[in-house]
Image: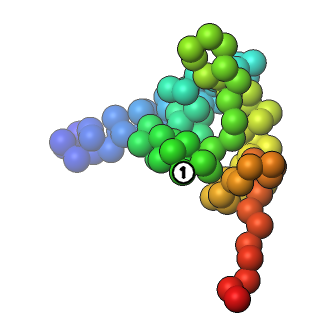
Amino acid sequence: MNAEQERERWQAELALVQARLACHLWQLPMMTNEQVPVALGISQTMWQTLKLEGRAPDGVWLGKRVFYRPADLLRWIALGLEAKKTPGEEPGVSVEQEPV
């Protein structure tokens, strides 16, 4: 096996481990801020960007830590995770206004 084949094999094994971990995370009652991007298959940077832009679902604060319910994340995905939130709006739902 040459170096390129070895690298591809390791990448395939890593992808399988990541997929198994993501499946396991969805079974938890709550996910930490660090676990959510792994479960969603996005980078930690992307997750932080979504949160900073107000495009992530609300979490549940327990003390100084925030947790996310898998059901809330699935709902957010179903509603369209790219949509902006405004106060009083459902997570992930965007109301577009036409230009005047």
As drawn, 89 above or below 99? above
Image coords of residue 30 (percent x, y): 70, 20
The residue that appears at 33% across and 44% down in the rendered structure is 8
Q: Residue at x 68, y 30 (%)?
A: 59
Residue matched to label 1: 53
Q: Secondary structure at mark 1?
A: loop
In the current view of this chain or complex, which residue is farthest to the bottom? 100
**Relative side of 1 to 99, left or right:** left
Residue depicted at 80% across the width and 33% down the height: 71
- Give the image location of residue 41, x and y in percent: 54, 42
Q: Is residue 33 left or right of residue 14?
A: right
Q: Could you say which is closer to the camera, residue 40 or residue 88?
A: 88
Would you say 19 lies left or right of 7 here?
right
Up the image or down, 69 lies above or below 4; here it is above
Q: Between 58 and 41, which is closer to the camera in this rendering?
A: 58
Frontmost residue, 82 versus 54: 54
In the rendered image, the quadrant that contains the N terminus is: top left
Farthest residue in the front direction?
A: 100
